[in-house]
Amino acid sequence: MGTHDEGEVSRRRFDVADAAPLLLDARGAVTSWTRRAEELLGYRAADAVGRGLERLLTEADALRAPEVLERARREGGWAGLLWARREDGGALPVMARITPAAEPGGVSRWLLLLSEVGEDAPGWNMSRSMLEQMLGGSPIGIAIVDTDLRFVWSNAALARFGGGPPRDRLGLRLADVQPGLDSEAIEAQMRRVLATGETVVGYEHLGHLRSAPHRETAHMMSFTRLDDDRGRPTGVYYTVVDITDRHRARQRLALLDRAGRRIGRTLDIVRTAQELADVTVPGFADAVTVDLLEPVLRGAEPTADGGPAEGVSLRRAGLRTAQWWGDAPDASPVDAGDLLAVSAGGGGRLTGSPAVAYPLGSPPARCLVTGRPWRGERAEGAGEAWTRALPPAGGAASVLIVPVRARGAVLGVTTFLRRRGREPFGEDDLALAEDLVSRAAVCVDNARRYTRERAAALVLQRNLLPHRLPEQDAVEASACYRPADELTGLGGDWYDLIPLSAARVALVVGEVPGFGIDAAAAMGRVRTAVRTLAALDLPPEEVLAHLDDLVARMAAEEDPASDGPDGSQAVGAGCLYVVYDPVGGRCVMAAAGHPAPAVVLPDGSVTFVELPQGPPLGAGGMPFEAAEVTLPEGSVLALHTDGLLAKGGEGAGGASGASVAGAASVAGGAWEAAHAGETGGAGETGRVADAEKAGHAGEATGAGRVVDAGGAETATDAGEAGDAEEASEAGHAWEVRGARRTPDTEKPGHARKAPEAEQTANAGGAETATGIGEAADAKGSETATGIGEAGDAGNAEEAADAEKVGRTGRTASTPLGERERLRQALERRAVSLDLRCQAVIDALVPDRPYDDVALLMARTRRLPPDRVAEWELPADPAAVAEARRTANRRLADWGLEELSFTTELVVSELVTNAIRYAAGPIRLRLIRERALTCEVFDGAATAPHPRHPRATDEGGRGLLLVSQLSRRWGTRFLPEGKVIWSEQPLTDPGV
């Protein structure tokens, strides 16, 4: 054994009670042997006494025996590690300590103590003094309780947790030592260990110790049972480690994680502020208020309100109190729109964000100005007027105020309160509160920016859509709009009701592809153009033709590098334009890539107008056609965008399928290709027109022609396909009067060419009817469909295919399944048209629609016959005086004598101009509605133009005089001539 081994062993202590003593004489021979030595080495006393020390050691250490004895004589003792040889020949490491034993006779002997140093040996390493030093000086609290759970021993470290020094604990239980602690839970763990013998490690306990009654502490405890030599339990040995810092760190991380998940789930400012308050109570604070500047709630830039005298005025956006906070409500979540009262008058609930004011110089006001937090130990006291804005009756002992700061701007302040009896806010709490509030501040600022943008978007939308439908006598109207983009409330769909001349009204519904502000801006441009064209009193098909030119021109003039609104956004837009005349119930309509309207007849039955479809706006291609129907009074027209019946995946682009096809046609002329029908073989007797050969062979003018699944053609009237019998039996007096196209002469420069109306000859040469609205024979007799129909009777299959292709591109009719859904929704009656319109939307449109939805419903009215007067006039100047007299008599019958003078002048000038410059029949008509309309019809196609005559001119003042006497006037062209009209307001309140 080396010197370092001897030195290390000499410093070690061991229990003498466990050592094996024996006596050696001066020469090192054994003179006395003990039972413990016999147990340790296996030699009996008779065999051991007389042996030299070297004979009890292994070969290697036997050589060292003389040296060890010599050092013991010289140094007065020796201690070290030796390898003893057992009686069975085995080697055993022992701790040896040699001490001289002096006798009175002067004979020197040696006392040798041997202690086993193996892993399981009860030797020197289990000495009492070492155990006491190790346990007593440990920084971990350690205690031993007996089977009655009373303290029998504890170390000094346990006193740091409260309860007094170790001697004061003897004989007491944990509840006596720590009265505020949940001792029952801890003693339950001890009893379980005593009963099972299983060690409990890592048991965590939260509570308030006697040494820190206001501070919640966390401890990790371990319990081990102690047994006697017979294995019977004698008590429990347990350790206590303070893990409060670790527990608080976990709490902070959990709170931050919870805040990240729960704050900012919406873009509502008040709700976001309330979420901050909800997250922090009761774990972090007992009461929390979130006060924001009033401009922030409006979405404006944050600016402090109030003057030097008033202080700072804010709005309470969030409040949460724990259930133990005075008489305030419990800690259940508070709705952001239903905040707790904040006045000193006590609790309760109120709606909105109440105002709170903080005096200048108060901590909240300083936080707003400096942007730095404030921490105080007491919130109440003399002169603290600002505390009246805090939740009452709480007895706050600690206050923490943190500014709500985001992107360099202070949006408000958040106040955290802790009641008396709870640990005041510290530096760690301040850092945590700043982190929480900064996260919430970003969410509040995002919500503020969204509120500002959405407010601007809503202003834009309100200015793009009608604020209210204008009052008129032609129809009773109601409209509903629901955008797909619920965040901005913007979309590309629109509706409009435009009063026209002669008591007529234009009903418009349309849609622009896409969502959001770009689609809304494009929609605004298209809608403005529609209103401008409507003011020109053009027919529906001409309005759509001009609108198509405008959209195509906007797309062509668009600069691809520009960051402004995209002019091509409107390409592929759909539009339905309907003009209703209440004088005779005449309704003319045309569509551009848009679903045809539905009609609810007075008896409640629903039918659909089979309207010829033109291409979407800006797509180019064929001309637009108009259909004319006569509606009985009380019929309801339902104009809707395709989003009304859209399902998942349909209409997601904000445009109908026809619109998409139209957009594609711009790139490669796919629109014409989609409408190219099959023209039959070379030997067919019925050939289609040249225009059809050019790519429009599938163009159909029959408003009600459909091809069934089997390929057989069936003609339908203005009612639903397949319901011709039912519609005819109903006996309703309305019909499709015919289809009209825009002549090429009316649209110079257009590449579109209207195909000539032709009749297709069958194999036998007999012509079949082509009138719109013809009903097929119930037995399946085949009827030709007019323009664009190809083939003869021998090529019926080819003709059917051609018709299918034409129908696919030419009509945006609603599929039968969707028509049935719409029919069922429209058949439901309601008290008013507004409720009926809303009921249709609710029945067909989900809460989050797939596409923008616009629905315009109009119940038709008829002007009574006594409100309209019409006269045929000869082309004779003498008829002017008779026209004035006739008009005066009718005004007298209507009680409008106050308008006689101006009406005489208007009638005189208009009739005179018609006689002087026009040809053909002349008619004078007076219409009394909300205004008095005077119309003069003549057969000329030229429009009059007012001019400014000189003082010396004898004529040229007629139309100038009419324009001065009328509220508005204009010219409306008809196929057989024109109408010049003038409108005068009815100013008499009694009229």
Image (cartoon, rainbow, N blue to C red):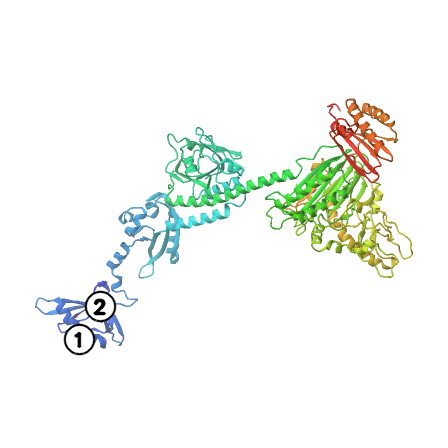
Q: Position of residue 254 (x, y in %)?
A: 45, 49
- Label 1 belongs to which residue? 52
Instruction: Tell me the number on the disc at residue 4.
Output: 2
The picture places residue 241, in percent across and down from the top left corner, at 34, 52
Q: From the viewer's perspective, is residue 72 above or below residue 390?
A: below
Badges 2 and 1: C-beta atoms under 8 Å apart? Answer: no
Residue 47: image x %, image y %?
20, 76
Few, some or many C-alpha atoms within 10 Å of disc 2 (few <14, some 14-19, many ≥20)? Answer: few
Relative depth, front residue between 215 and 182? 215
Left or right of 246 in this view: 559: right
Toward the front, the furthest residue is: 952
Mark 1 neighbour density, 10 Å: few (under 14) some (14–19) many (20 or more) = some
As rendered, which of 944 and 305 lies closer to the eye? 944
Q: Secondary structure beneath disc 2? A: helix
Q: Indicate the position of residue 903 as horizontal and vertical percent values.
A: 79, 26
Could you give the CA–CA distance between mark 2 and mark 1, rounded to whole angstroms? 26 Å
Earlier sequence position, callout 2 versus callout 1: 2
Q: Report the residue at 23% width, 74% height from top.
A: 43
Residue 156 falls left or right of residue 75: right
The amino acid marked with disc number 1 is: Gly
Let me know if residue 97 appears in the view: no
Q: Residue at x 26, y 48 (%)?
A: 167
Tag on residue 563?
none
**Type of the residue with mark 2:** His
Relative to the observer, which residue lies in front, 246 or 294?
Answer: 294
Report whether 698 appears left or right of 657.
right
Q: Nearer the viewer, mark 2 or mark 1?
A: 2
Q: Element type at marker 1?
A: loop
Q: Is residue 199 above or below residue 901?
A: below
On the question of residue 674 being in view, the answer is yes
* Viewer-side residue, 658 vs 424: 658
Q: In what quadrant of the picture does the N terminus appear? A: bottom left
